[in-house]
Image (cartoon, grey):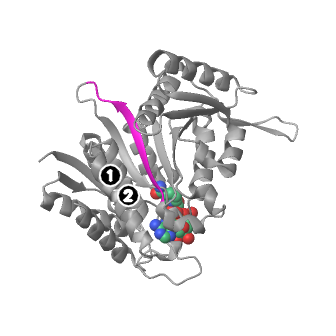
Amino acid sequence: MASYNLFLLPGDGIGPEVMAEVEKILAWFKAKGIASFNTDRGLVGGCAYDAHGAAISEADMEKAMAADAVLFGAVGGPKWDKVPYDVRPEAGLLRLRKDLGLFANLRPAICYPALADASSLKKDVVEGLDILIVRELTGGVYFGEPKTITDLGNGQKRGIDTQVYDTFEIERISRVAFELAKTRKGKVSSAEKRNVMKTGVLWNEIVTRVHKEEYSSIQLEHVLADNCAMQLVRWPKQYDVIVTDNLFGDVLSDVAAMLTGSLGMLPSASLGAPDAKTKRRKALYEPVHGSAPDIAGTGAANPIAMIASFGMALRYSFGLGEWADKLDQAISAVLAKGLRTKDIAGDKPANATTSQMGEAILQEIQALA
Ligand code: NAD
C-alpha cells in the first residue's frame, strides 16, 4: 500500500470542524488499504499565535516542508484582530506559500447538478459547469517593486504598485495550465491585457511560445482579461482551463466561484515546482473560505470545500485520480439526495450538520468502493 506524509493544519474557527470530516475519510482509506496517509498535525493562525507567539512555528514549517502535501483549514477570527501585523493569522498562510514556493493556484469551479438552481445565473448557463482557473500566485502587481505611497508635498500623494513578470514565471505557470488541460478537455484560455500592458504583451508572447514548442496538441486561445470576466458570466462553459496572472486571477477566480453557489463548496490547490529527484511538487490544499467565526462551534459549517480540497490532493499529489473522481461522485450523490448544510439550503431550513454531511459523503464513497 502506498504511503504518503500529509501534514494537517486545521487552523482556527471552522477549520478544525471541517478538517475532522476529512480525517474520517483518511481513516477509511487506510482501513480499506487504498493508501496509507501518515498524518501529523500542526498549529497555524490564531491558535499558533496563542501557543507560540507566531502565526506558524519553525517546527511546523519544517514539517510542512518535509510533507508530501499540506492540508490547510482556515485561519483568523476577532480574537486576533489586534495582534501585531507580522504575526497576524494570515501571516502563517503567506509564509507557507512563500517558503513552499507555491506559484500556481488552482481553483476549480464545478456546478453540481443538484445546486444549479442555487446559482444567481440561469440554470442552463451553469448546470454541468467544470472549469479550472490557474492563477499565478507569487509574482505580479501584489509583489512588484517599487510599491510606495509618496507625499508629493503639494497636498497630493502618489500610490505606486508595479506589475512585473519575468519569462520564467510565465513559462512555469503556462506549463502547469497546459499539463492540466491534457488531463481535461484539452483547451487553455490565456487571459491578459496585452492591449494596454507590457506585461500582457510579454505574457501573450511567452504562452504562445511554450504552446508552440511543447504543447501544440492542446488548443490555445488568448482572451483579454476584461472580456474573460464578461464571458464567464455570459457562457462559462466555453472554458476549460483559464491561465492568468496574480491580479486578474484573483478577480476572475472569485467571479467563477460565484457561478457555483456557496463559499462552503469551493476547494483550491497551490502547487510549487516539481522536485528534481522525486518529480513531486510541493503542494498545499485548502478551502477558499475563511474561518467563519459567525458559525464556528454551531455545527453549521459545510465540510464540502475541505473534503473537495482533499480530493484535489488525491488527484494532484498522490496520483489517485480515480479516488478523486469517486469523492466528487459521492459529493454529487449526497447533494442529489437533498442533504443541505445551511449555506446551500436556500430558503429552506438546513437538514444536515457538518458531521452529518461528512458522514453521508463517507458512506457514499464506501458504497462506490
Ligand atoms: P469567511 O469565508 O470566513 O466567511 C464568509 C461567510 O461565509 C460567513 O457568513 C460564513 O459563515 C460563511 N461561510 C464560510 N465558509 C463556510 C462554510 N464552510 N460553510 C458554511 N458557511 C461558510 O470570510 P470572513 O467572514 O470575511 O472572514 C472570517 C475570518 O476568516 C477573518 O478573520 C478572515 O481574515 C479569515 N479568512 C481566512 C482565510 C483563510 O484562512 N484562507 C480566507 C478568508 C478569510
Residue 60 pos. (x, y %): 28, 49
- Left or right: residue 68 versus residue 260 is left
Left-right relation of 41 to 36: right
Mark 1 → mark 2, Cα distance in angstroms: 6 Å
- What residue is rendered at 54% in x and 53% in y? 129
Q: In front: 188, or 158?
A: 188
Task: State the residue position of label 2.
Answer: 328
The type of residue carrying mark 2 is Asp
Residue under pointer 1 = 324
Could you tell me if residue 57 is visible in this image?
no
Number of disc labels? 2
Task: Inspect the image, locate mark 1, and give the three-letter code of the amino acid beneath it.
Answer: Ala
Q: Find numbered disc 1 in the image and state the secondary structure of the residue it sits on.
A: helix
Q: Main secondary structure of the magenta part?
A: strand
Q: Residue at x 60, y 24 (%)?
A: 203
Task: Using the image, determine if residue 104 lies above or below residue 232.
Answer: above
- Identity of the residue furthest to the right in this view: 154
Residue found at x 44% / y 82%: 351
271 part of magenta stretch: yes
The image quadrant that residue 75 belongs to is: bottom left
Q: Nearer the viewer, residue 164 or 32?
A: 32
Q: Secondary structure at mark 2?
A: helix
Could you say which is closer to the camera, residue 93 or residue 48? 93
- Find residue 67 and report its horizontal and vertical position in percent: 25, 44
Q: Give the residues in magenta.
A: 266-276
Is residue 37 placed above or below 220 in the rendered structure? below
Tell me the quarter of the picture where residue 257 sits: bottom right
Location of the C terminus (image quadrant): bottom left
Q: Nearer the viewer, residue 222 or 297?
A: 222
Tags 1 and 2 in contact by the CB under 8 Å rule? yes
Q: Judge whether residue 366 is colored magenta.
A: no
Q: Is residue 320 above or below residue 143?
A: below
